[in-house]
């Protein structure tokens, strides 16, 4: 039995997905990763 293939994504869908993923990655870096790194580095100072 053959599976139905999903239709190819349009260029606008790919562009929108890439924009959303970029903003989510930037949000995670700014509000999660960088503060954790700063707190870790700060824990070594008296």
Image (cartoon, grey):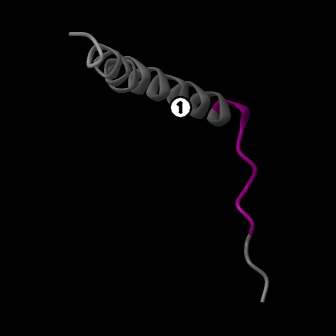
Q: Residue furthest right?
A: 2
Quadrant in which the N terminus appears:
bottom right
Residue at far left of view: 46
Image position of 16 (left or right of 2): left
Residue 37 in the magenta stretch? The answer is: no
Residue at 32 percent of width and 21 percent of height: 31
Who is closer to the viewer here, 13 or 38? 38
Q: Nearer the viewer, residue 24 or 29?
A: 29
Residue 46, image x, y percentages: 20, 10
Crowd band around label 1 with a 10 angstrom C-alpha radius: few (<14), some (14–19), many (20+): few
Start and end of the magenta stretch?
5-12
Q: Position of residue 9 (x, y in %)?
A: 71, 45
Q: Which residue is mark 1?
A: 21
* Horizontal arrangement in the rendering, residue 36 relative to residue 20 (left or right): left
20 and 12: which is toward the camera? 20
Q: Residue at coordinates 75% horizontally, 66% vertically from top-left? A: 5
Q: Residue visible at 53% across and 31% down?
A: 21
- Residue found at the very far front of the displayed protein: 46
Which residue is more in the foreground, 43 or 28? 43
| Residue shown at 26% from the left, 10% from the top | 45
Q: Is 31 positioned to the left or the right of 25 in the image?
A: left
Looking at this rendering, what residue extends furthest in the bottom direction?
1
């Amino acid at each position: 039995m053959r599976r139905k293939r999903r239709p190819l994504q349009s260029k606008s869908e790919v562009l929108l997905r890439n924009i959303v993923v970029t903003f989510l990655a930037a949000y995670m870096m700014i509000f999660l990763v960088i503060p954790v790194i700063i707190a870790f580095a700060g824990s070594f100072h008296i």
